[in-house]
Amino acid sequence: MRIRLRHAAIAATTVFALTLSACASEDPISGGDSAAGDDETIVIGTANFPESEIIGQVWAAALTDAGFDVEVTSGIGSREVYLRALEEGSVDLVPEYSGNLAQYYLADSGGTELGAGSSADDVYAALEQSLPEDLSVGNLAEGQSQDSYRVTRELADQYQLASLGDLNNVEQVRIAGNPELAERPYGPQGLTDIYGVDSEKVTVVPISDGGGPLTIATLLEGAAEVANIYTTSPLLDSAGNEIDLVTLDDPEQLILPQNVLPLLRADAVPQEALDAVNEASESLTTDSLVAMNLRNVGEEKAEPTVIARDFVDQL
């Protein structure tokens, strides 16, 4: 069996980061005899950041080992873009994160937003209820890629910062993060509503690199007091050196659980294929995601296909 890859073209370059968009290729999908007795290829789509590509390739390797033909369409774009591709049928399966996906579909369906303190089970139940009829989800992985708020150890020591509520101790709270953080429920408004942080002192410093080296550089240079960085992101400076940052605790669970899970078109992915994906996902922990991301963006610069194959071979 085989995995075929279609890589999206680079659409535009900004001063902060590269943004990928979907490739307009319409290469035919050639089928073969799969373990499910279906000759259609399963098309996995990934978002425009490395972790999504790595997870997609892990599932592709697991499906190939289970006897299915798989094609990976890489770097489709943001959630809005790749979900449209899924709903329109150009891809069959995408890696997702439970909390943000649930919030997306709850907002789209007019459902009640998930509040602070929601558990992983709460999020999963809300997600199942809000999904469009032709979509379904697989099992939650243990691994989560949550937003988190990080500060330098020097600032933490100076102001005795241990949790998000302690940000009240700081004169100003400039948060380096993606521009959309300003409007997210766990952004400035959430810090004020849940932790009582003075809204007048909180601002977002927009950095469009998903909590990567530019965000970290902004923090280290003192242009921000706080950085919004995913829990699975390796902490590297612009030279690729690992750095020590303090993650502020979130005891009120302002930030929703963000377990990795597959989102799929139910009529396009046979149960045997979903079983293979779920089995691979059982070993996706937060630590394993950090390790795989580090192989990709760190000194090794390993390709997602290599990282994924190594991971699946060890299962």
Image (tube, rainbow, N blue to C red):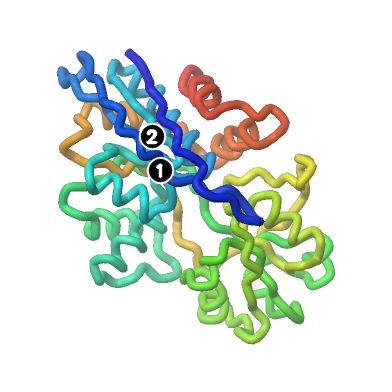
Q: Name the spot of residue 226 as percent of width and height, x first.
A: 69, 66
Residue 267 can be seen, yes or no = yes
Q: Which of 77 and 265 lies nearest the eye of the viewer?
A: 77
Residue at horizontal 58 percent and vertical 33 percent from the top = 292
Instruction: Tell whether 227 sits left or right of 112.
Output: right
Q: Which of 42 and 313 lies nearest the eye of the viewer?
A: 42
Badge 1 is on which residue? 22
Number of residues whose C-alpha sits closer than 10 Å to that of mark 2, classed few (under 14), some (14–19) or many (20 or more): many
Between label 1 and label 2, give the one nearer the viewer: 1
Amino acid type shown at disc 2 = Thr
Q: Which mark is residue 73?
A: 2
Quarter of the view holding residue 31: top left
Quarter of the view holding residue 137: top left
Q: Is residue 42 above or below residue 184?
A: above
Q: Is residue 5 above or below residue 37?
A: below
Quarter of the view holding residue 204: bottom right
Q: Is residue 33 above or below residue 48?
A: above
Residue at horizontal 20 percent and vertical 14 percent from the top = 33
* Mark positioned earlier in the residue sequence (1 or 2): 1
Which quadrant of the figure contains the N terminus? top left
Amino acid type shown at disc 1 = Ala
Q: Name the spot of residue 113 as percent of width and height, x first.
A: 34, 70
Q: Are marks 1 and 2 in contact (CB under 8 Å)?
A: yes
